[in-house]
Image (cartoon, helix red, strand yellow):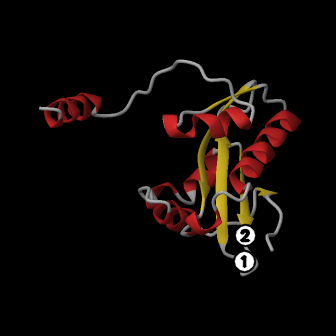
């Protein structure tokens, strides 16, 4: 059985990068533990063996607006409601501390998931360092 989703769950610096890699993402090892100092709060869930199986956070200035990122559930524990519970726990904490707007970006395959969590789809944009080289690379791969 699972433990409860905890806000600011104590997490070792290597646990989130390992979880990121288990879902096929870059580990971003250099982000941890610094991320814990810079985000407003995070939430995590451990399994019965005390292994981190879910993680997500909200960052921002801590005023009216926050940004949700890295909603991660270990592949062996996906499709069991953990992701939705994680998002809802983060949103409940955001509301508790006075954040009124939470935004996030996600791949279109996750549209229904986030809509079921209460998000309204909207347009936006993403800036990324070296975006020109990424655009050129994508354009060249289409040829």
Which residue lies under the disc numbered 2? 46
Q: Where is residue 115 in the image (x, y as percent from the top left)?
A: 68, 32
Is residue 59 visible in the rendered structure shown here? Answer: no
| Mark 1–mark 2 distance (CA, rounded to whole Å) | 5 Å
Q: Say the numbered circle drawn on residue 134.
A: none
Q: Where is residue 81 in the image (x, y as percent from the top left)?
A: 74, 54
Is residue 97 visible in the rendered structure shown here? Answer: yes
Q: What secondary structure is marked by label 2? A: strand
Q: Position of residue 107 (x, y in %)?
A: 49, 37
In screen coordinates, is 34 left or right of 114?
left
Q: How dense is the environment of label 2, judged by Cα within 10 Å: few (below 14), some, or many (20 and up)?
A: some
Q: Quadrant of residue 4?
A: bottom right
Q: Residue furthest bottom?
A: 49
Circles 1 and 2 in contact, beta carbons < 8 Å: yes
Q: Position of residue 142 (x, y in %)?
A: 17, 33
Relative to residue 136, is residue 26 depicted above or below?
below
Q: Say the numbered circle drawn on residue 50.
A: 1
Q: Residue at x 61, y 23 (%)?
A: 121
- Quadrant of the frame with the C terminus: top left
Q: Is 107 or 49 nearer to us in this picture?
A: 107
In screen coordinates, is 9 left or right of 16?
right
Q: Is 31 or 131 nearer to us in this picture?
A: 131
Q: How dense is the environment of label 1, judged by Cα within 10 Å: few (below 14), some, or many (20 and up)?
A: few
Q: What secondary structure is marked by label 1? A: loop
Q: Residue at x 49, y 66 (%)?
A: 22
């Amino acid at each position: 059985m699972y433990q409860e989703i905890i806000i600011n769950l104590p997490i070792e610096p290597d646990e989130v990068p390992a979880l990121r890699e288990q879902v096929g993402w870059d580990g971003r090892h250099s982000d941890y533990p610094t991320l814990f100092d810079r985000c407003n709060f995070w939430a995590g869930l451990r399994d019965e063996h005390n292994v981190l199986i879910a993680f997500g956070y909200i960052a921002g200035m801590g005023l009216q607006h926050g940004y949700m990122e890295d909603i991660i559930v270990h592949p062996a524990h996906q499709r069991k409601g953990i992701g939705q519970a994680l998002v809802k726990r983060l949103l409940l904490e955001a509301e508790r501390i006075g954040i009124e707007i939470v935004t996030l970006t996600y791949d279109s395959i996750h549209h229904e998931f986030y809509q079921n969590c209460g998000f309204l789809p909207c347009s936006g944009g993403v800036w990324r360092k070296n975006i020109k080289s990424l655009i050129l690379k994508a354009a060249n791969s289409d040829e």
